[in-house]
Structure formats: C-alpha cells, structure tokens
Image: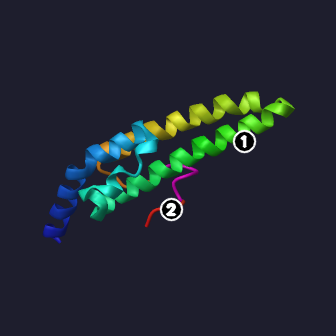
Amino acid sequence: MEEQKKAETSDVEKNKALAIVGYIIPILFFIPLVTDAKNSPFAKFHANQQLNLLLFWVVGQIAATVLTFVLIGFLIFPLVMIAGVIFMIMGIINASKGEMKGLPLIGGFKLIS
C-alpha cells in the first residue's frame, strides 16, 4: 500500500506541469498523450478534462454565434467565457494540488480512455 502511494505521488509530481499547461492553453490537451506521460493515469485524466474544457468553449461560442441572430447570443458569449475561465482556474488548482477531481458540469464526460 505504501509503495503504491509513493508511485502515485511520483506520477503526480512527474506530470504536474503537463497537466497545468493544458489548462492554460486547452488546445494542447494532447501533449500528455504523445509524450512519456501517456501511461500516467493522472496526466490522462487531466488531458480528458482539458479536452472537455476546449469542447465547452468551442460549442459554447458556436451556440452563442448562432443565437446572436435572435439577440440572446450577446448574453451567452460572456457567460461562456466567464464559465470557461472559472473551469480553467479550477483545473489548474486541482492539477497543482495533485488531485483528480472533475470539473463541474463538464468533467463527467470521458472522451480519452
């Protein structure tokens, strides 16, 4: 049990930087998947969360653009951006603490296995 905990701790410490970078620039979510971190459960978990965040931003902005024609999109644009920044900050905090906590609302989707 103690050895497993040490292994998990070393995995977290080794891949923490990759997990944080992907939240700052979500388009880089794939970096842990093409480096030595591809076998790390911690790195894969946060890569999945970063992909969820990227998709949230893309889909939210597309929906806001389409809804601009009925004038509600102007309200959705800032909400999507503010929510995305909040999710980004939460992800950075979780990754820096070494936690594997999903983001609210969007973190439950598992796109990367």
Of 11 and 18, nearer the camera is 18
Indicate the position of residue 56 as horizontal and vertical percent values. 59, 46
Asked which secondary structure carries label 1, the reply is helix
* Above-or-below relation of 38 to 21: below
> Residue 65's quadrant in the figure?
top right
In this rendering, does residue 13 appear at all? Answer: yes
In the rendered image, the vertical position of residue 9 relative to residue 75, given as above or below = below
Answer yes or no: do the residues labelled 1 and 2 have beta carbons within 8 Å? no
Q: Is residue 89 above or below residue 6?
A: above
Please tell me whether residue 92 belongs to the stretch shown in magenta.
no
Q: Quadrant of residue 67?
A: top right
- Residue 80 image offset from top left, x and y in percent: 63, 36
Q: What x and y, as percent, mark residue 35? A: 27, 55
The furthest residue to the bottom: 1
Residue located 45% across and 48% down the image? 50
Name the element at disc 2.
loop
Tell me the number on the disc at residue 63: 1
Residue 43 in view in this figure:
no
Quadrant housing the N terminus = bottom left
Q: How is the image coloured?
A: rainbow
Q: Residue placed at 27% from the left, 43% from the top?
A: 17
User: Is residue 27 positioned above or below 85 on the image?
Assistant: below
Mark 1 vs mark 2, CA separation in Å: 21 Å
User: What is the number of the mark on residue 111?
Assistant: 2
* Residue 90, quarter of picture: top left
The amino acid sitting under disc 2 is: Leu
Which residue is located at x 39 percent, y 43 percent? 22
Q: Nearer the viewer, residue 64 or 100?
A: 64
Residue at point 32%, 63% (across, down): 41
